[in-house]
Image (spheres, rainbow, N blue to C red):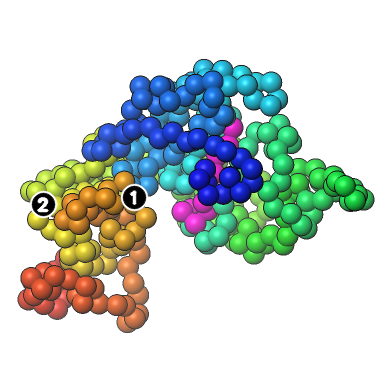
Amino acid sequence: MCRDILPKLGRRVQYRLARFDPLTGELDLRHLASLIDARTKLVCCTGASNFFGTKNPIATIRALANASRYQQPGGERRSYLLVDGAQLAPGTFVDVQALDVDYLSSSFHKMLAPFGVGVLYAKEHLLESSLPFLYGGDMIAEGRVFADRVGYNVLPWKYAAGTPNILGTIVSAQALRILLDLALTPKRPAYFGTGKRIERPAVECAMGRVAAWNRRLTARALYRIGAIPGITIYGPRDASERTSLVAFNVAGRDPMDLWALSAWLRPLWVPSQSQPCRPKQNRPRRKAAAPARKAVAPRSGSATTSPISHLTPSTASEIRSMPSTPSSR
């Protein structure tokens, strides 16, 4: 963005990267504070890491951004804060007003919805004062097209360029309603397929239950995985300080071999080094981490690709010597 896209728009931007602990994924807040000064327009962070599972202290980062003294165009003297909530929102109740974030993005496909639909929240005065970056459709105000200028539509149409993903948006809304029903009243759906208004207490209660279940599941996973000899677990060991993603290394094992063994013994999705988990990508292959995530088992008789062809000879031989129907299945 800073090196390739913004310069084409005539914007020259310097970006600064804060350090983090390579084992826990926790931000070095002292180093972050040293990077934020009166020239810092925007502070960006993840709500939770997609590699370590570590949750960032957003309130602390917000305070650091507020103290920058950067002169914003609207007169405010602080840095704006943008939070990538893609990993945080699916398992946590997120109150953007309580967090006081200026921008927050998230993806619906992590909440039972299809790919291609997400959300960008921003404070209303920022949306009002910002220029659109896509053009067409309803973003131009009726009768406000002139030879030398155009007038933009009111919010939210100001940013509705072209034909929106109508079907994806409708399906995503129903997926969120299913999530509420599963968390609150799984035997008596109250929201899916209806136009019932969703109130804040229902969302807070549902996501509270999701978060509590994730903590229990993650604590059990950390305990069981941590008991295996030769394993290094990344991220906080306290389940309340992380998401349900658990990244780990096994001494002496190639990550592709781990993936194949897991796929053979149990139909889990275990992303290998080729998945977009970048913090470790420059380390030797034998050190690559294998993040374990929840998955759905393939249907009986469905077509699958055998992972054995991708293995080292020793591991392939190990798998072939296993029973055809492992006891752990």
The count of marks equals 2
Residue underneath mark 1? 278
Choose between 171 and 100: the one closer to the eye.
Answer: 100
Looking at the rendered structure, the kind of residue marked 1 is Arg
Say which residue label 2 marks: 251
220 left or right of 119? left
108 in the magenta segment: yes
Residue at left offset 34%, top offset 59%: 275
Q: Which of the 4 image quarters holds residue 166?
A: bottom right
Q: What stretch is highlighted in magenta?
A: 101-111
Q: Quadrant of residue 163?
A: bottom right
- Helix, strand or loop for disc 2: loop
Sequence-first disc among 2 and 1? 2
**In the figure, 123 relative to 214: above or below?**
above
Q: Residue 181, labelled with which disc?
A: none
Q: Distance between the residues labelled 2 and 1?
A: 20 Å
Q: Nearer the viewer, residue 81 or 222?
A: 81
